Image: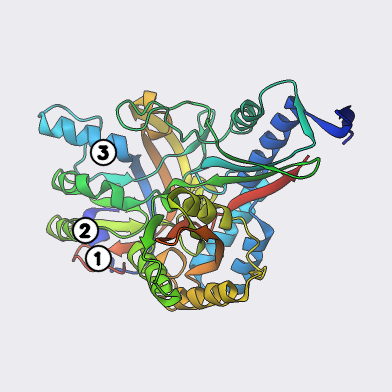
Amino acid sequence: MTRDELSKLRAGDFFYYSGEIYLARDVAHSRICKLIEQGKSLPFELQDSVVFYAGPVMNGDKIISCGPTTSARMDKFTGTILEKGAKLLIGKGPRSREVQKSIKENRAVYALALGGCGALYAKSIVSNEIVAYQELGTEAIRKLLVDKMPLWVGIDAKGESIL
Amino acid sequence: MTHKFGFYNSVLMKTIYYKQIIEAVSSACKKIVTILDREIVAILRSYENSKVLEMMLKNIELAEEENLPICQDTGTVVVFAEVGQQVHIEGGNFEEAIHCGVRDGYQNFRKSIVAEPLFDRVNTNDNTPAIIHTKIVDGDSLRLLIMAKGGGSENKSTIKIFAPTATHSEIEDFVVDWIASVGAAACPPYIIGLGIGGNFEQSAILAKRALVVPLRGVNPLGVYDEMEKSILDKIQKLKIGPQGLGKYPTALGVKILHAPCHIASLPVAINLGCYVHRHCEVVL
């Protein structure tokens, strides 16, 4: 889905996302923002990226459970991530006013995945690979290819929220 | 299971082996992370009224059928241990046996524990240590209440020490306002454990312990039972709903445990549990 397609969705809409997404949670966000601050190169291109706040359960190289973590913990980094061009953020729970404003300004979308539904979300993952920070274990940045990931629009591109 | 018994100063003692504890904890962890408590499943089913609940139940079935973790946050293991005075533990250290059980049980689950909390935050890579609350009780059995507690709901727990003259409705308001402020952040529908009385730390431990009180049970003290029902009713009216997307239910239960306290204080602790409420009881 392109940014234009995503921006047509309204808060509360249910949709399926298929395509490339990046897993990044607390430490990954903190490190990315530090790199941006220092003007260094990033582990993945943020322009038009999709970021999913999650730390999966692995069985070997396979992800067997992968639901969202609480998005609000990423709030303090989200403005920077959006300014660098992320088009879709996926997590669970409410966001700060600043994030809501930044979503509108950057014409991005915040989608809700169902918390606690790790097994179900793992079923929509086609492939995954580590992109950076392998030493963080479950907190490493991973690139996923997902097929029909079920989501709800929490905050739409106009800044409207259902939370 | 057969146990070895022996006399110590004319008291009949039961021997429980270190390895038995490891095995019991390990298999409990493997079970609770993949198979959700029947009571929770039954309550969720009784509400099945939306796409959200339908998907949540589908996830629970899928996890059980395919032996997958229901939630990717497979939690911190919390153990309430009641050790009978006539139990003799042989073959190793009691707490170490619990940690070993967690290490073994979590081989294929997420490792969510860091060794030092502030500066390094390096993962222990085996999900240990567990958090253990041990009580010495009468009898010759070892009872373990084992929980796998998620981080998201734990983050939304709190404690407040009221003046001793506070009324039950002030406490009810505190709990309801707290849940309203949490909103959908901690995976509703919630299980709410309340610890009232004791002191600073005891109220928090009681709130945690309250999370494993059977949801459909009745509080033995009528006034607390009424208070549980009243708080639950007010929380449902917040209409946060499953994941903040439905209307009902916002909570699956409210459970209160209380304890004696100082004349100057009235501590109240709220421990939140998400709907993937993983716990079981093992008796050796």
Q: Are marks 1 and 2 on the same chain?
A: yes
- Give the image location of residue A71, x and y in percent: 32, 51
Residue A144 appears in which quarter of the rendering?
top left
Label 3 resides on the chain identified as: A
CA distance separating discs 2 and 3 = 25 Å
Q: Quadrant of the N terminus of chain B?
A: top right
Q: Which residue is mark 2?
A: A4
Graded by Cα atoms within 10 Å as few (under 14), some (14 to 19) or many (20 or more), the crowding at tag 3 reads: many
Q: Nearer the viewer, mark 1 or mark 3?
A: 3
Q: Which mark is residue A29?
A: 3
| Vertical position of residue A134 compared to residue A13: above or below | above
Q: Quadrant of the C terminus of chain B?
A: top right
Q: Which residue is mark 1?
A: A8
Graded by Cα atoms within 10 Å as few (under 14), some (14 to 19) or many (20 or more), the crowding at tag 2 reads: few
Residue B105 appears in which quarter of the rendering?
top right
| Vertical position of residue B168 compared to residue A86: above or below | below
| Circle nearer the N terminus (2, 3) | 2
Q: Nearer the viewer, mark 2 or mark 3?
A: 3
Going by the image, does B120 lie left or right of A105?
right
Q: Residue at x 28, y 57 (%)?
A: A110
- Give the image location of residue B273, x and y in percent: 50, 56
- Give the image location of residue B216, x and y in percent: 66, 68
Label 1 resides on the chain identified as: A
Closer to us: A17 or A74: A74
Mark 2 element type: helix
The three-letter code of the residue at mark 1 reads Lys
The three-letter code of the residue at mark 3 reads His
CA distance separating discs 1 and 2 = 7 Å
